Image (spheres, helix red, strand yellow):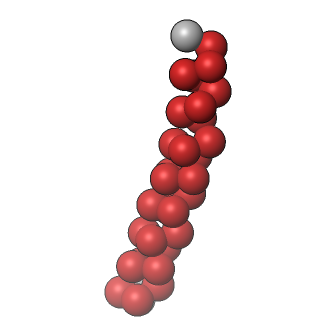
C-alpha cells in the first residue's frame, strides 16, 4: 500500500471515530 493511501485511510478512520463519538455521547448523556 502506498503512503498516500495509508494516510487517506487513517484520515477516514479518524473521521469515522469522531462521528461515532459525537453520535454516541448525547445518547449516553441522555441515559445517565
User: 23 or 8, which lies in front?
Assistant: 23
Q: Residue furthest left?
A: 3
Taking the spot 45% from the left edge, 61% from the top edge, the residue there is 14
Taking the spot 59% from the left edge, 31% from the top edge, the residue there is 26
| Location of residue 2 in the rendering, given as x and y in whole percent from the top left corner | 41, 89
User: Compared with residue 14, is residue 5 higher up or lower down, i.e. above or below?
Assistant: below
Q: Residue furthest top?
A: 32
User: 17 or 31, which lies in front?
Assistant: 31
Taking the spot 57% from the left edge, 53% from the top edge, the residue there is 19
| Location of residue 32 in the rendering, given as x and y in whole percent from the top left corner | 55, 10
Taking the spot 62% from the left edge, 13% from the top edge, the residue there is 31
| Location of residue 17 in the rendering, given as x and y in whole percent from the top left corner | 50, 51
In terms of image quadrants, where is residue 28? top right
Answer left or right for 25 relative to 14.
right
User: Compared with residue 31, is residue 19 higher up or lower down, i.e. above or below?
Assistant: below
User: Compared with residue 7, is residue 24 higher up or lower down, i.e. above or below?
Assistant: above
User: 16 or 10, which lies in front?
Assistant: 16
User: 12 or 22, which lies in front?
Assistant: 22
How many marks overall?
0
Which image quarter is the N terminus in? bottom left
Amino acid at each position: 500500500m502506498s503512503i498516500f493511501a495509508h494516510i487517506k485511510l487513517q484520515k477516514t478512520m479518524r473521521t469515522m471515530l469522531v462521528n461515532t463519538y459525537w453520535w454516541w455521547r448525547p445518547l449516553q448523556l441522555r441515559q445517565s
